[in-house]
Image (cartoon, grey):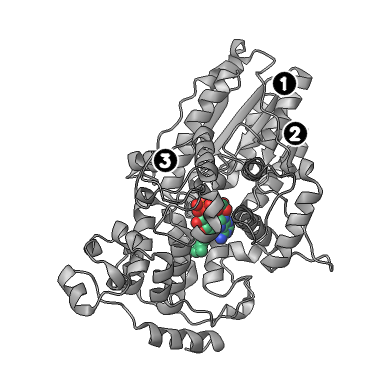
Amino acid sequence: HSVVYWMRMEDMRICDNRALAAASAMAIKEGIPLLVLFVLSPQDYVAHDRSPRRIDFTLRNLALIKASLSDIDIPLHVVTHKPRRDIPSFVISFLRSMKATRLFANMEYEVDELRRDIQVCELGKDEGISPMFIHDKLIIEPGVLTSKQGKPYAVYSPFQRLWLSTLNGDLDKYLAEASSPEPNPASVRQHPTFSGLFSTELPTAIDGFDCADRDQMATVWPAGTIAAREMLRRFLYTKSRSSHVGLSDPLEDGAVSSDKRSRALVYKEGRDKADRDTTSRLSPYLSAGVISARECVRATLILLGAKKVQATRDTSVGVWVQEIAWRDFYTHVMAAFPRVSMGRPFQEKYADVQWETNQAHFDAWKEGRTGVPIVDAAMRQANTMGWMHNRPRMIAAMYLTKDLMLDWRLGERYFMEQFIDGDLGSNNGGWQWSASTGTDPQPYFRIFNPYSQSEKADPTGDYIRAFVPELREVFGPDVHNPPAKLADKLGYPRPLVDHKEARERALRRYKNPGVQ
Ligand code: FAD
């Protein structure tokens, strides 16, 4: 007999992992082997617009996980399986072949994944297998936080207030560290069936997901929980480094800012500045579960020497923890309103907004050739780093939907295809926020002026200069909106649209969905 932990794309770590801890405890208790299974599913990656960078990050993490598990006598078996529809029966047949009657996995809340897991439960019944799906991804799992009427929250602020009081009401429960897996009791290396699993080769690439900048990604986003913890430590305890705006090794020492406080302690003032290295850059690690959200929040308690979690706007650390709450919020929204993960707007009344169909504009946006420097810098950052600072994400998304009047779903998909941190809940939430079709109570007439946003997000212009080489020699206000003559001379494109006119068009279209 044996116990299987089925690791998935969002829980790629071995410490503080609830399903793995539960599987390990059961294996120890029963004196039976623990096996870890990972199913690579290229069809799912296509269906969910996964980026080659994310797939590569998954494979790089798997290699480290395999080595760490092997050190404690736990085999990791990685298989590539097509088609996606059969994954439930494939998993059950794997369990059968390993004589496993217990299966543990952490929950995934997307519609397709929930359906898949329900099928696993159904198929398992016939085989006497009882799968156990455990909440692990978020600080507080979906379904716990409801309004007085028992409804899921559709607005962040009240959600966040209840999130914080619920969390502080039972810190031991919500932040408890899951125990680490222990060496396998039943000496699986001696057993012919299990020992073979140790030697299964890990694929280094998946067809259709060729990561052209693999080496660069491995430098900018090193894999593994040790790297993630170092990112967290740097954010909490070290000062920001201006040299780290562009493509560089985030863990390398660089020029530090003159501020004496760490990035976490100036996050409130610094977080919207894309021209400085002010945020944690943990999103790839949190999205892939290389580090747990619990560990991040626990670390803030240690930093502050506090007994309660701070998550109010008064302090920098509080504002940062609120971002972790946003991550919870968007996954709660996705779980409670499945339409958002099926390409529908959260606010159904905007389903008929009339979008432009202009491939040339869409291509220019994707390639960072819109003629609006902050948007172009943002898109070129996405294309080269597989990641973007939050403020430029908002500006680039708002520009696509309100200035170019292109469907937010095009942008949502493009971000997923580029980003290493692609997460359906957060990406969809961010896009619907920008398109004013989401949970945000602000009405559609909040439309960013990309030029004034640029001055706020990139006051020095360093961000634009880092990613838009045509403007590398431009200093002062011109970098945000280069005069036509200068732009022509530098070979930088003229703006695709006039912001004022585009704004009027967006107001008309949103006011009367369905009308051109
Ligand atoms: P920090 O500022 O250090 O924040 C810490 C953590 O909090 C982040 O790592 C992330 O896990 C979480 N977080 C921060 N801001 C948000 C937010 N607005 N919503 C949800 N969680 C948040 N985030 C993703 O992880 N994956 C995505 O695919 C994604 N797509 C986005 C698309 C758009 C259009 C927008 C506007 C935002 C998107 N975000 C996404 C949210 C946010 O931009 C990133 O999480 C953040 O920029 C990551 O940088 P960081 O790790 O340095 O963040």
Circle 1: residue type: His
Amino acid type shown at disc 2 = Glu
Q: Which of 414/218 is in front?
A: 218
Q: Judge whether residue 194 can be spotted in this image.
A: yes
For marks 1 and 3 on the same chain, the one whose residue lies earlier in the sequence: 1
Question: Helix or strand or loop: what does disc 1 sit on?
Answer: loop
Mark carried by residue 1: 1
Q: Looking at the image, is mark 2 or mark 3 earlier in the sequence?
A: 2
How packed mark 3 is, by other alpha carbons closer than 10 Å (few <14, some 14-19, many 20 or more), is some
Q: Dot 1, crowdedness within 10 Å: few (<14), some or many (≥20)?
A: some
Front disc: 2 or 1: 1
Question: Residue 313: x, y in percent?
Answer: 64, 62
Residue at 44 percent across and 87 percent down: it is: 505
Image disc number at residue 127: 2
Mark 2 → mark 1, Cα distance in angstroms: 14 Å
Residue displayed at 69% across by 66% down:
157
Residue at the extreme top: 190
477 sits left or right of 278 in the view? left
- The residue pinned by badge 3 equals 206
